[in-house]
Each structure stands twice: as structure tokens, then as C-alpha cells.
Image (tube, coloured by chain):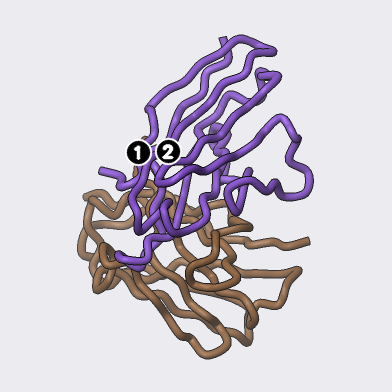
Amino acid sequence: QSVLTQPPSASGTPGQRVTITCSGSSSSIGSNAVNWYQQLPGAAPKLLVYNNIQRPSGVPDRFSGSRSGTSASLAISGLQSEDEAYYYCAAWDGSLNTWLFGGGTKLTVL
Amino acid sequence: EVRLVQSGPEVKKPGESLKISCKGSGFSFTSSWIGWVRQMPGKGLEWMGVIYPRDSDTKYSPSFQGQVTISADKSFNTAFLQWNSLKASDTAIYYCATQVTVNSRPHYWGQGTLVTVSS
């Protein structure tokens, strides 16, 4: 069982905005930056958002992150069919001294 | 371009040993940490540990301490993940990834190595 909690699934139609949440603790999200990864079918994870809100070069600004307290969110606007993937949140836990990942959210574009 | 190229898929029997590799290029291998992440079939991501190839300083997740060995050969820009006695529950895809520090995000990822353990 993951220590970061995500909904197992989310969905939306093309053009819509969807939000995926990630809940942690004071020693993980409450104290450290949150990162988000996208995993397309059969591929390795790809860094999508880091330091809560920043995007690596090449990631569209349709993807945005936020953090408040011990929770974080990933918003995807202007949903496209190629956004269909698993999305994982991740944060360092200073008490456990390990990286934690959420259980993953499967995004379906209807 | 940062690249991490991992060794190919493996099929092993329970009790056998195994060492898989991750070769880096396009960045300073000895100035980066290399982490390993497990993904069991149909499941999420689990961080296993990380190594600093310059001096082989290694940190393990408590869940994986004593279960695997992480090592590196800086002369060949290569990190390794090793098992002495595989179990069926070790069946998974294993990814390596660059990290700036132990507690910085896994950033660039290898393509993954599928390890299948079956009698």
C-alpha cells in the first residue's frame, strides 16, 4: 500500500480539464517538493512536473502542479487523447528516508 | 543528450543470482546519483535505493535493505542491481534513473529491464 494516496482512475473528454490529487503526510508532501510522472503504456516514467509547480523543458503548459499542506494536485487542461496514461506523484519522506510514490492514477480520455 | 541504457530482459529460476546494468552517457556519471525503481506487474513505482558512483556511497530504502545490492563501476559509467537468490516475487520491471542528490527527484530514466523469475 502506497503512503502517498491517489485516486485509482480519472477521466475526461477531449478539451476538458481534469485534476488528479495526491495526499501525503507532514514528513513527505508537508516538508518536501512534489513531483509528477507520466507513464505511457509500455514506456518508462517521464518527469512531468517537479518542485511542485515547475515543468521540464518540452512539457506543455497544459500540465500544471500545485501543493497545499500535505496534499498536491496535477491539473491537465485541454485534454488530448495522447494524455491517456498513468500519472504518479512522488515525494521524499524525511522520516522514512526514502522516496515515496503514489499508487498511480489511470487517466482515460473518453 | 542524457541517456541511460539498461541491460536486456532476464528469465531466471528461483534461487538463482542476477546482476542487471544501467549505462549512462551524455552527463557526468560521477557527479550524479543513480537510483533504482521497481515496478511489479500491473503495479506502481517503488524506490529501491541509490548510489553515488564516484565513491560508491549507497543508500537503500528500508523496504529493500538486505534484499538487493546496488553497485557501480565508474570506469564504465555503469550502475548495477544485484540479487543473490531470486524469488518469484522479484518478477518486475526495474528502472534506473538519475538523481542530483539522494533526496532529489529521479529525473532521467532508463528504458527498464524486465526480470521474470519462474520455475
Instruction: Measuring from the top left, give residue A22's x and y in whole percent.
Output: 42, 38
Q: Quadrant for residue A91, please give it.
A: bottom left
Q: Is residue B19 left or right of residue B112?
A: left
Which residue: 72% across, 50% down?
A: A56
Q: Is residue B119 above or below residue A103?
A: below
- Which of A37 and B48 lies nearest the eye of the viewer? A37
Residue type indicated by callout 2: Cys
Q: Which chain is brown?
A: B
Residue where numbered disc 2 is placed: A22
* Res. B10 in view: no
* Res. A80 in view: yes
Residue type indicated by callout 1: Thr
Mark number, residue B9: none
- Which of A32 and B10 lies nearest the eye of the viewer? A32
Which residue: 55% across, 73% down?
A: B101
Q: Which chain is purple?
A: A
Q: Residue furthest bottom?
A: B55
Instruction: Measuring from the top left, give residue A11's x and y in whole percent.
Output: 51, 16
* Secondary structure at numbered mark 2: strand
Residue where numbered disc 1 is placed: A5
Distance CA(mark 1)–CA(mark 2): 5 Å
- Dot 2 falls on which chain? A
Figure quadrant of the C terminus of chain A: top right
| Dot placed on the residue nearer the N-terminal end, 1 or 2 | 1
Within 10 Å of the Cα at label 2, are there few (<14), some (14-19), or many (20+) other Cα atoms?
A: many
> Is the C-beta separation of discs 1 and 2 under 8 Å?
yes
Instruction: Measuring from the top left, give residue B119's x and y in whole percent.
Output: 21, 50
Q: Is residue B34 left or right of residue A30?
A: right
Figure quadrant of the N terminus of chain A: top left
Which residue: 56% across, 34% down?
A: A74
